[in-house]
Image: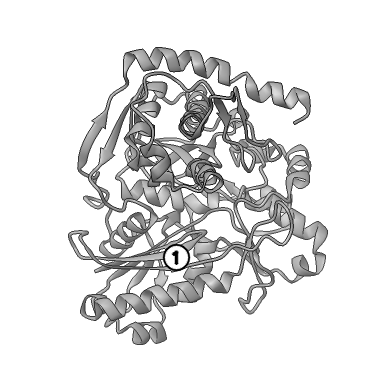
Amino acid sequence: MYIGLDIGTSSVKAILLDEDQSLVASATSDLTVGRPHPGWSEQDPDSWWTACENVLDALKAEAPGALAAVKGIGLSGHMHGATLLDDAGKPLRPCILWNDGRSSKQCAELQDAEPKFLSLGGNLVMPGFTAPKLQWVRENEPEIFARTAKVLLPKDYVRFRLTGEYAGDMSDSAGTLWLDVAKRDWSDDLLAATGLTRAHMPRLVEGSSPSGVLKPDLCARWGIEKAPVVAGGGGDNAASACGVGAVEPGSAFVSLGTSGVLFVTNDRFSPNVAGAVHAFCHAVPDTWHQMGVILSATDSLNWLAGVLKKTPAALTGELSKVSAPSAVSFLPYLGGERTPHNDVDIRAGFFGISHDTGDAELTHAVLDGVAFALKDCLEALSVAGTRVDRLLAVGGGSRSDTWLEIIASLLNVTVDVPVDGDFGGSLGAARLGQAAALGTTEGIFSKPSIKASIEPRPALTESYAEAYGRWRKLYPALKQSGF
């Protein structure tokens, strides 16, 4: 038996799998996000632990016999969160989350002061990353910074509570900007740029390797007979890739969740800093990955649904079969954008609204706008030498065949839709836990069964290419106008 724990922004999810990776039990516990100032996003680290206790208590209630036989636990978590601990392992302040934008000033200063962030770190210095957050704390909360003994990522704080070990995996740690991504090791120079040393960092392990074992008192609490190993785990997208079997170079998926991700597995470190591509270590050894990331995918549709007082499913259900791009354009920059603009200040907008524009036209524009933003990601990946011919679709937005048809035709790729199931971070985490327990990755990361493959429609591909060319002119026009 194996447990996958996924520390999400809005909830913690746990799943329990048997030796064949069949689901035995699952549980979810909700989380809240604090926004004390505009552009800030924080969470209490101890709320993650409370949620973990809740979901593991629920697994025990649902399947006590199966839980007793657990051999491995894997972890997945939202990336970049700055969790600051004192020398007793106590949080010093709320965690500054991935979508917090307060450190934009520090980003520019760090990037100018230490060019190795771009070469060794392989990514632009963005407010979402951990390093500029620590620089913000250093400048604005010096008393907290001075007391900081360890800096952990969210899932690694949960690991500390599970095992007592300070450890992190390569994929998640690459998102701090302190990692030499090609060497898969901390960089002393990058740490020094923010006033830190290796002593502030957890030790590094591969995502499929053991990082420790469950504490005896927790084994007793949940009735686990022999202390299971806790795997290194992975950042949420790398763990999701393990869940869908995207671990071989060239395999790729598109995730339509709150944010949108175009993820491609690579056999080497392949950055494209100018295009704001994320180039990170994968959660399996000797493997890397690239991501194009947009901040508001289903978030854009959920926002529109809230404004129109309808459900997202109702909005997409009202659309007829798409025969051409929407006459209305939408920029999905509700909270800024990452790939390819790295712009925390840009905001969303509709263009081309007329008296005839209704709910269906606005919905179509939102689906198109998110697809255009994913096309931006694909273009940025291509500059880094990556070719994508086929994508697996995951996330809540993948339930819309209309949306997937737009994406397939615009990106001119085949989009595979898996048989219904949960292929998120919790499954990937459980698989990493199984690999750590068995001491091998062989046969662990299989691909899901496919229920449908959506091919590009040539007529749509041509018309969407023209529409994308027009859409791309909107961002520079807005920036030039001062928006």
Residue drawn at 41 percent across, 81 percent down: 215
Does residue 424 appear to the left or right of 65 in the view shown? right
Q: Name the residue type under label 1.
A: Val
Mark 1 element type: strand
Quarter of the rendering occupied by the N terminus: bottom left
Q: Nearer the viewer, residue 62 or 429?
A: 62
**Coordinates of residue 11 in the picture (x, y in percent):** 47, 63
Dot 1, crowdedness within 10 Å: few (<14), some or many (≥20)? Answer: many
Q: Would you say residue 156 is visible in this rendering?
A: yes
**Coordinates of residue 103 in the picture (x, y in percent):** 73, 49
Residue drawn at 61 percent across, 37 percent down: 333
Does residue 198 appear to the left or right of 426 in the view shown? right
The image quarter containing residue 264 is: top left
Give the residue at the far left of this rendering. Answer: 20
Residue drawn at 73 percent across, 43 percent down: 107
Quarter of the rendering occupied by the C terminus: top right
Tell me: residue 367, above or below residue 6. above
Tell me: residue 141, above or below residue 442. below
How many labels sit on residues? 1
Q: Nearer the viewer, residue 429 or 118?
A: 429
**Coordinates of residue 439 in the picture (x, y in percent):** 28, 60
Tell me: residue 94, above or below residue 242. below
Q: Nearer the viewer, residue 120 or 327?
A: 327
Residue highlighted by disc 1: 12
The image quarter containing residue 134 is: bottom right
**Coordinates of residue 481 in the picture (x, y in percent):** 77, 24
